[in-house]
Image: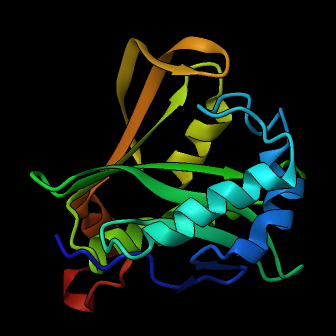
Amino acid sequence: MNKTGTQKIETHRLILRRFKTEDAEDMFHNWASDPEVTRFLTWPPHESIEASKDLLKIWVDSYEDSGFFNWAIEYRETEQVVGSISVVRLNENIDAADIGYCMSRALWGKGLMPEALTAVITYLFDAAGLNRVAACHDVNNPKSGRVMEKAGMQKEGILRAAGKNNQGICDEVWYAILRKDREDLISNLSPKPISERE
């Protein structure tokens, strides 16, 4: 793999970039303090902006490590940071990464999270040279699975009592996409020469 670190990625509606300490207010108000957003996450809601600031300081310092991948999700329409998406586990032996993400509840259902996830998957394949990108969700949070499906990931199975989040021990539903899957998808979407058409 290539340790390319967290580089800026732009999509139609989003700018994915490195976090700054100045993002603390957006982070706290838009998602980190919301118990509904953090319901199935592994960390509790932030009780103050100071908690968000402290975490951001750690993240900003971590950008010195080129193997650290953690993007702020900035919504172009409002110019606010509305969520995060990051590599939560990196396995260099097999060029694989597990991804985690969260977003402001006010923007759920608009297709923004699949847009961000698709962009990060593309970056991890094309720039970082990974071969596999995976993610999981609590079996009781199927909406997260739909995000993964929209980003082209395939359901691989359920690991019983394999995770723990704010709801306690949970069954994890795992999805993944391989570089080959993405290449096949692009190939199938590309117009074929007339000679190859049925």
Q: Who's the residue at 37% across and 17% down the image? A: 159
88 or 114: nearer the viewer? 88
Q: Position of residue 51 (x, y in %)?
A: 75, 49
Is residue 152 visible to us here? no
Q: Residue at x 55, y 60 (%)?
A: 58
55 or 185: nearer the viewer: 55
Locate the N terminus and report the quarter of the image it occupies: bottom left
Residue 178: image quadrant is: bottom left
Residue 83 horizontal side relative to residue 58, left or right: right
**Quadrant placement of the C terminus:** bottom left
Residue extending farthest bottom: 194
Across and down, in percent, residue 99 comes to: 44, 50
Which residue: 85% across, 55% down?
49
- Above or below, comparing residue 101 to residue 186 in the picture: above
Q: Is residue 46 left or right of residue 17?
A: right
Image coords of residue 86 (percent x, y): 49, 58
Q: Position of residue 6 (x, y in %)?
A: 44, 76
Protein image colouring? rainbow
| In-image side of 41 versus 7 (left or right) | right
Q: Residue at x 68, y 56 (%)?
A: 54
Quadrant in the picture for residue 185: bottom left
- In the rendered image, the residue lying farthest to the left is 93
Say whether residue 71 is left or right of residue 126. right
Query: Which image quarter: residue 167?
Result: top right
Tell me if I can see residue 110 in this picture.
yes
